[in-house]
Image (tube, rainbow, N blue to C red):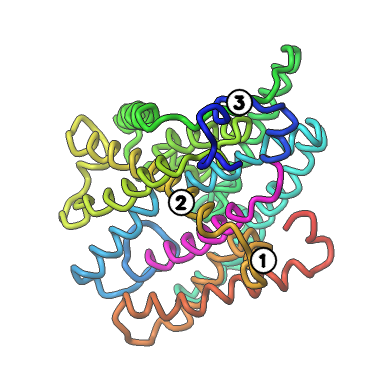
Amino acid sequence: MSPETATPAASRRTPAASDVQSKATSRLLFVDNLRVFLTILVLLHHLMIIYAGTGGFYYKEGRQDFITSALGGWFCQVNQAYFMGLFLLISAYFVPGSYDRKGAGRFLKDRLIRLGIPLAVYSWIIDPLFVYVGLALSEGLSMPLWRFFPAEYFREYGPLIGAGPLWFIETLLIFSLVYVLWRLLTRTRPAQPAVETRFPGSGFIALFALLLALVAFVVRLWLPLGWNFESLNLQLPFFVLYIALFGFGLIAYRRNWFLGLPEATGRLWLGIAVLLPLMLAANAIPDDSPFTGGWRWEAIAHALWESFLCFGMCIGLVYLFRRYLDHQGGLAHFLSRNAYTAYLIHEVVIIALAYAVRDVALYPLLKWGLVALVAVPLCFGLSSLIRKLPYTDRAL
């Protein structure tokens, strides 16, 4: 019986630990589909930066009229509020089960292979080469590669590790290492059976979102939005939500919350997720610096908006995909298998495409849409080819 149709008596039943584990570790197709959606959204987000000029990126172009900058800024700010946090939430959901099955040593080895190898290859080989070629084409750089890397690259252009979108892989690896340490430090405690509990009530979620908004506001008194720990390429002002959502994902696995999310709660927060983006007006203001941090009402308003939108999107999208997209055909299965590698390579692909059509004169938003129609299938197609290379099966 599903959580939505359970009787009051049944909903109070505490299942056996093995029952919870079997449901939580079974293949969740709606989560796979949600990962694909987020991967494509990241690609579209970075393409929008190229053509709307909002945010930092290697390459930007576009006519900065009001419509382009307003719609582009709105699109990117809405995405920024939730999409990487949701990525961390669904990634964390599968961490406890994986650790339980493999133990500390094998779990850590697998994390280092699947996360550490792509992180190192991209940060220390692909990104330096990409930057070098870009500088040679755009600025006529004549310095030999052996001089550019590593000294010039690390001093002027790249972080020590976590270049480009690989900051997320770096973050996930750090969080996974912290989880391993926590499990090792607490392994002497008596084992507690897994208990399936009701999904938290909306009042509790709202209170938690409010608390996180206040913590984020305090953090941004010293580290305003846009501040970056450059050596590791980590934008720490966003990490209040990132840490909370990773922890939420760990708890959600034990409590089986992805499958136990009530319909009423899912619909409510999905509605919040739809309404809150309409309230965003900062992009229509020439100077949005008051929203980035400091003792300003705009900063606390933005932190509240971001926190509630994040929870609305996370809960609403989990509900939406579980309710309507818990199945896969051939195309969805293909996209799901190749989503991780598509994420890893998407930055190089979209910048190369954008640079190739830089002289094509089109309205920026139209150009964004047309390039996206090529970039999305190209990223997933190249991902499929890369994954067929020798020795890539474990890492990708």
User: Which numbered disc flags the more N-terminal residue, 3 or 1?
Assistant: 3
User: Which numbered disc flags the more N-terminal residue, 1 or 2?
Assistant: 2
- Name the quarter where the N terminus is drawn: top right
Residue under numbered circle 3 = 13
What is the magenta range? 24-49
Front-lying residue, 108 or 358: 108
User: Which numbered disc flags the more N-terminal residue, 3 or 2?
Assistant: 3
Q: Nearer the viewer, mark 3 or mark 2?
A: 3
Q: Is residue 366 above or below residue 115?
A: below
Q: Is residue 33 magenta?
A: yes
Q: Which amino acid type is marked by label 2? A: Leu
Q: Which mark is residue 333?
A: 1
Residue under numbered circle 2 = 317
Front-lying residue, 347 or 266: 266
**Is residue 148 in view from this perspective?**
no
Element on which disc 2 rests: helix
Q: Which amino acid type is marked by label 3? A: Arg
Callout 1 environment at 10 Å: few (<14), some (14 to 19), or many (20+)? some
